[in-house]
Amino acid sequence: MDSSSNEKIKRYMKEDGIHFVPVWRIFGFSGANMAVNLYMGITMIMSYYLNGYVGMAVVLASSFSTIMRLWDGVTDPIVGFLIDKFGGRFGKTRLCLVIGGTMLFVNSFLMFNVTDRLPETGIRTIFFVVFTLLYYIGYTFLNISNHVGNVCLTNDPSQRPILSIVGTVIVRVMRAVMTVVVASLAVKYGSLKSADLFHEFTVIGLVMMTLGIGTIGRKLGLKKAMQLGSWGVVVMDALAIGLWLLCDPKTLNLPGYTNGYGQAFTGLSFFTIMLFLVSVVGGGFQMITSSIIPPMIADVTDYEASRSGKYIPGMVGTLFSFMDKMISSFGPLLVGVGFAAIGFGDKFPDLNTPYSTSLLMIAIVFYYGLELIGALFNIGAMKFYDLTPEKMKSIEEIIYKMRETNE
């Protein structure tokens, strides 16, 4: 390492091996996390494209998403192992960003802009499957860049929560924007199955990608913050379920729209106000739990380095991703089975589908029920998490001494 590189490193070093990062770099790096979530966002409605243009039935289209997520999980440890072996002067994070970003853009463009223009034969299915497999490999690379980058940018216990919170806030804002965009495109083209909707979404996703709560994490520590967020999710989801079941959803009203009874807006109803409050507060608690995960992965990486002497951020990050994707991969399949069970075996419910009690129950189970169960698992798992702020400080001291000895 040359003298100029050493000077840059020393500029951001504190005592006992603690290094920090300027705030502007935190915001810049968050663009990678935003890109990961935007690209994953289009796969959340991919089943409509499969059902409408690739020719798959509802359960098969949902199963396809499950299979691809499992494939995504399988590739994680493999790519993580390879990344830990390479990088060099260019850096592991930059390598993942370039490879992942390029693969995701090229393959998403081919998947959603070319497939529906091919002859309506088996070639559509083959074409879509091949480029979806490549798409998820690119997603793995881009996702790894976040895990590796979180470890490299800073090991300052007071700054890691900020790094994650900035990324989470930016992602939440972009998700909200893209939710509005997808809803607007669905109305514009008349259906979520419209090929034009997917064409336009891909272009907007690229533009958003190029645009390149913290107090709780810093004050309480990661473990207590996760416990607080998880209990908050449990309470808010339980309240939301009770609200939908015990109150009248047809009274939901907004300015410029009629409610479920065809009545014009005359003021916010009790149901509307309570749903807004529960959604906002519950979303805040959920944001805490999701934003705490990246710095936890970084802490586990440092713990492993102090314990075994092996610095393997790629492998640690992808082991987490593997479990995350393996569990979440069953989401689309469960939704497909749930829809099929209430009579939607051939096509998904769409904008023009009449409301029904069965659809409401399915929505409650999958939107609130599964998240509530996941939060309870979080609470149980935190009983076995021992990486407190005090212990992390001692771990950084061990790593610093190991680094000095090697030098």
Image (cartoon, grey):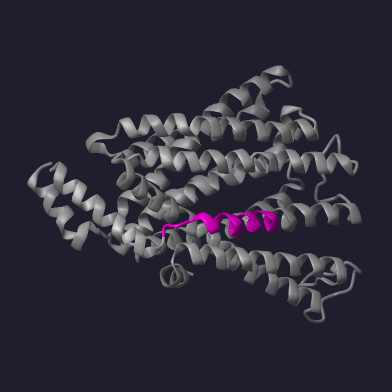
The answer to which quarter of the image holds residue 194 is: top right
Q: In the picture shown, does residue 307 fall above or below 285?
A: above
Q: In the picture shown, does residue 350 fall above or below 55?
A: below
- x, y (%) of residue 152? 31, 49
Q: Main secondary structure of the magenta part?
A: helix
- x, y (%) of residue 279? 68, 68
Could you say which is closer to the camera, residue 2 or residue 224? 224
- Residue visible at 65% across and 51% down in the picture: 182
Q: In this image, 307 relative to 403: left or right?
A: right
- Residue visible at 85% across and 75% down in the picture: 264
Q: On the rendered image, what quadrant is the C terminus found in?
A: top left
- x, y (%) of residue 401? 19, 51
- Residue visible at 90% across and 69% down in the picture: 262
Q: In this image, 336 relative to 129: left or right?
A: right
Could you say which is closer to the camera, residue 404 or residue 298? 404
Outermost left residue = 3
For the magenta stretch, what is the residue range?
371-387
> Is residue 180 magenta-colored?
no
> Is residue 383 magenta-colored?
yes
Q: On the rendered image, what quadrant is the N terminus found in?
A: top left
